[in-house]
Image: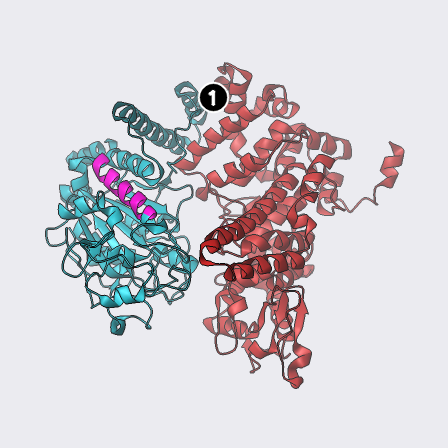
Chain colours: A cyan, B red
């Protein structure tokens, strides 16, 4: 709330000519972005099932999700794609309302197939052939660009214990892991005030005040959650609990968020319609739907959630009922204000899912490079100029998929 | 008294340092150790600062409190020699493939747990030593070099290797020669795995380690090497890899002319079949040796480069003195580095004896690992705590997990990485947790009583409002004065 008030003041100040010109339209000003990183490379072919492909079922005799209409079958999204049934009550309704889209054949050109290397290179968002600057993540560069224009007081936060590479850099970014917050204890208001008083005359005064304020907001969100839980006897756990807390914070205070979710490296026994991976999808889906609900209609309209992963997995199942490291993956895009041509659709460049189109005869190809896709999204969300985009993803031509 | 004094080895050379008063002595202790406590203050007061610092720079064998030593002795990383441990894990991993489908998942999970347990033991050992070893500077320098030559438990197998990496590649040389550290870290399977040199072979060059070896370990960015040097060094390093873990694994078949080049030391292996025997030029001069000797030739060149002296001295001064250390100090340390051929004690002595170091006492912002360990040392002194797991958890929560930094650059050394809003709020919660953990009154601590009069008025005013000893402890550990060392 504070930052929006501040914006209003800046806009009204008589000497703020230059800053006022930098302020973009209100839509851009309220835009919120959350990036969800599925660490471990999730198996996208069992999430967005190529239902029209016989090759899919042949390549995965033990783990394929059956055809729509069959027991445990995929839910048809269009003639060629279906959704894993574990998402029937969470992401499917969003998709039907035009608030979710999928981008298959997405990813990076990084071919190391190493989780470690590829997560890093995606978060840094730098050219693959250049020297890596580990102090400059792409979301941080975005925050820097936004801070100079459309969102003068952009407020980035990672809902993680450590600041992730994606948010490291010159722009100031907060981080707070939410899963453990509210487990009893903690400093009370009087103690917090005493601590703030100790820092009053020190260079850390602002950071201390801000940090304690964020912590209070998290606590309020947690308290509201508990009240609600008491009322309708529904408790959330795992990622949904975290996601609802994130929504409360992004509704009120932060506009650029990052979170990661692990447990996707399914080399062994991943299951099909049911089983290990289905459970992960269920938890993630509930979290994302909970995030949308907790945001509330108005804020959700200004919000875009992008779910990414470092790479896809092998199209064929391996000898252990799992899949190994692959290449192209499927990104998810969710938001209350997705464009009509994107929401409820499978978007981006696509090819038929058959053996002939596999990359190196094993993986999905990457046809929608992530920096180009994010660049196109940022252009639309924030009205960034080509020069501004170049500061986020140097030398990359944005690819406008018309997502919002 | 006299007898025990005679039993000590001859006093090592004492650096030219002095502290006029108790406050200054405490600040020296705070900087040289993981954090001041009463026991260390008594030791310094008894010995004098300079002889004490001399002893810190030249430690003998470690003597830990028996209760702590017993914990370390019981660890699998202590009881099982590294080669045997590798063989056991290798057998466990290979047995998984022979199991029926339904048994594989639990077996894989058990294997992963074994790796996690080994990493946990290694972290615990680090924490026990940091808290209770009398050789505090050695423990601090071990952390510094572990961070300088970073490996990460995030990379699978490193979890099983990191304890041995610290124990045999890094710690024995923490106050030794830089060149030795280069050689031992290069040959350790943890580094060979972490930076992929195990995959680096003739015709399938992997430059990862070669690049970081120059960029992060020796010359530094802008240290005068080119992309061509990266490639040439990668070629030098081809064939340097990890020997099979199984004890009975045969050596590779090497053609007779090169058989003498085959090296196996522990799990380090130099495999001539994978080495690029072509001529090479590195840093402007040809490499004259052929085979495994090329590696030492390249390391000698790197260790003696003036850029390395400057880069390593800058890192040390950044960690100990200031985010942007005074150039004159770095120049003096670099000169000591070059003069002594990379003797770490000589470089540290140049730093400790400088006016810049003395001037900086009490101004260095404590990173999470210093903050948490220092607080626990202050609160518990020589009392042996029940478990170090909470401490390791606090350090991780503040974003500086021990051995957990994923990228080769190591944890940042500068203040801006650790003083963000969220991190400060977390730090205060941890102050509260540390205070809740101990049944002491810090207000009575001789260390705190010496420092308290120097605290700023707002801090003293806040402390005066405390309603219980525990709350006083919390506020004390959350005070701005306690954030610096």
Q: Is A290 covered by the magenta stretch?
A: yes
Whole-percent x, y for residue A207 in the image: 39, 34
Say which residue appears at 57% left-offset and 39% top-offset. Answer: B360
Say which residue appears at 43% left-offset and 24% top-offset. Answer: A187
Count numbered badges in the picture.
Answer: 1
In the image: residue B113, left or right of residue A184: right
Query: Looking at the magenta stretch, what is its main secondary structure?
Result: helix
Out of A262 and B238, give the one closest to the viewer: A262
Say which residue appears at 68% left-offset and 30% top-offset. Answer: B382
Residue bearing the label numbered 1: B458
Magenta highlight range = A279-294
In the image: residue A178, left or right of residue B51: left
Q: Farthest residue in the left direction? A: A340
The subunit carrying tag 1 is B
Element at label 1:
helix
Q: Is A202 covered by the magenta stretch?
A: no
Out of B432 and A63, give the one closest to the viewer: A63
């Amino acid at each position: 709330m504070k930052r929006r008030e501040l914006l209003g003041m800046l806009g009204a100040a008589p000497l703020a000519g230059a800053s006022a010109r930098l302020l973009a339209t209100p839509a851009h000003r309220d835009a919120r972005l959350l990036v969800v990183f599925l660490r471990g490379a999730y198996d996208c072919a069992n999430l967005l099932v190529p239902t029209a492909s016989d090759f899919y079922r042949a390549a995965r005799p033990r783990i394929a999700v059956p055809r729509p209409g069959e027991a445990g079958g995929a839910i048809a999204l269009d003639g060629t794609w279906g959704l894993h049934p574990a998402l029937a009550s969470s992401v499917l309704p969003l998709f039907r309302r035009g608030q979710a889209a999928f981008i298959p054949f997405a990813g990076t050109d990084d071919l190391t197939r190493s989780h470690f290397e590829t997560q890093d290179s995606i978060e840094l968002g730098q050219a693959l052939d250049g020297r890596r600057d580990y102090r400059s993540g792409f979301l941080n560069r975005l925050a820097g660009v936004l801070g100079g224009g459309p969102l003068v007081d952009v407020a980035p936060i990672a809902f993680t214990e450590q600041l992730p590479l994606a948010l490291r850099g010159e722009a100031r970014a907060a981080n707070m892991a939410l899963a453990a917050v509210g487990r009893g204890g903690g400093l009370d208001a009087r103690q917090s005030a005493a601590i703030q008083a100790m820092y009053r005359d020190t260079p850390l005064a602002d950071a201390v005040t801000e940090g304690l304020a964020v912590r209070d907001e998290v606590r309020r969100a947690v308290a509201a959650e508990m009240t609600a839980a008491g009322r309708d006897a529904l408790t959330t756990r795992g990622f949904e609990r975290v996601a609802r807390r994130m929504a409360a914070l992004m509704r009120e205070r932060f506009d650029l968020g990052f979170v990661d979710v692990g447990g996707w490296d399914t080399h062994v026994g991943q299951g099909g319609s049911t089983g290990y991976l289905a459970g992960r999808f269920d938890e993630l889906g509930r979290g994302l739907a909970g995030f949308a609900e907790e945001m509330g209609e108005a804020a959700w309209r200004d919000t875009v959630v992008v779910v990414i992963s470092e790479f896809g997995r092998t199209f064929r199942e391996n000898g252990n009922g799992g899949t190994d490291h692959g290449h192209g993956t499927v990104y998810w895009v969710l938001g209350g204000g997705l464009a009509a041509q994107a929401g409820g659709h499978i978007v981006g460049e696509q090819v038929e899912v058959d053996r002939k189109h596999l990359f190196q005869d094993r993986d999905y190809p990457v046809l929608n490079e992530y920096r180009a896709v994010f660049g196109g999204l940022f252009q639309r969300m924030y009205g960034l100029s080509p020069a501004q985009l170049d500061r986020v993803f140097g030398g990359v031509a944005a690819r406008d998929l018309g997502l919002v | 008294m006299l007898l025990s004094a005679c039993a000590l080895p001859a006093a090592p050379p004492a650096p030219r340092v002095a502290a006029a008063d108790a406050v200054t002595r405490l600040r020296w202790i705070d900087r040289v150790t993981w954090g001041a406590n009463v026991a260390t203050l008594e030791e310094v007061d008894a010995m004098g600062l300079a002889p004490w610092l001399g002893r810190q720079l030249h430690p003998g064998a470690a003597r830990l409190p028996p209760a702590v030593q017993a914990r370390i002795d019981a660890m699998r990383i202590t009881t099982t020699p590294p080669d045997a441990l590798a063989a056991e894990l290798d057998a466990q991993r290979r047995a998984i493939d022979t199991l029926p489908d339904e048994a594989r998942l639990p077996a894989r999970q058990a294997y992963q747990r074994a790796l996690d347990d080994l990493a946990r033991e290694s972290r615990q050992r680090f924490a026990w030593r940091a808290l209770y070893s009398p050789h505090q500077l050695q423990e601090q320098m071990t952390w510094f070099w572990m961070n300088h030559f970073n490996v990460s438990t995030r990379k699978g197998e490193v979890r099983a290797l990191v304890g041995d990496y610290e124990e045999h590649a890094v710690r024995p040389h923490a106050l030794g020669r830089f060149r030795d550290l280069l050689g031992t870290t290069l040959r350790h399977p943890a580094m060979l795995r972490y930076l992929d040199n195990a995959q680096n072979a003739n015709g399938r060059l992997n430059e990862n380690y070669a690049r970081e070896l120059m960029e992060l370990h020796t010359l530094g960015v802008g240290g005068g090497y080119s992309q061509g040097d990266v490639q040439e060094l990668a070629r030098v390093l081809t064939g340097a890899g990890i020997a099979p873990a199984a004890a009975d694994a045969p050596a590779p078949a090497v053609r007779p002319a090169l058989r003498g080049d085959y090296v196996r030391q522990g799990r380090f292996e130099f495999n001539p079949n994978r080495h690029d025997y072509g001529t090479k030029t590195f840093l402007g001069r040809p490499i004259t040796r052929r085979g495994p000797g090329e590696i030492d030739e390249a390391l000698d060149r790197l260790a003696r480069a003036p850029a390395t002296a400057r880069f390593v001295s800058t890192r040390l001064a950044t960690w100990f003195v200031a985010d942007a250390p005074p150039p004159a100090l770095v120049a003096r340390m670099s000169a000591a580095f070059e003069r002594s051929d990379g003797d770490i004690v000589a470089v540290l002595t140049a730093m400790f004896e400088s006016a810049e170091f003395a001037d900086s006492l009490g101004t260095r912002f404590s990173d999470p690992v210093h903050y948490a360990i220092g607080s626990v040392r202050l609160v518990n002194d020589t009392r042996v705590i029940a478990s170090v797991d909470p401490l390791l958890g606090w350090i991780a929560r503040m974003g500086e997990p021990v051995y957990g930094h994923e990228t080769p650059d190591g944890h940042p050394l500068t203040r801006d990485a650790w003083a963000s809003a969220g991190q400060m709020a977390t730090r205060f919660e941890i102050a509260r947790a540390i205070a809740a953990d101990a049944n002491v009154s810090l207000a009575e601590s001789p260390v705190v009583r010496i420092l308290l009069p120097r605290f700023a008025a707002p801090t003293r005013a806040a402390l005066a409002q405390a309603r219980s000893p525990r709350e006083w402890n919390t506020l004390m550990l959350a005070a701005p004065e306690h954030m610096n060392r």
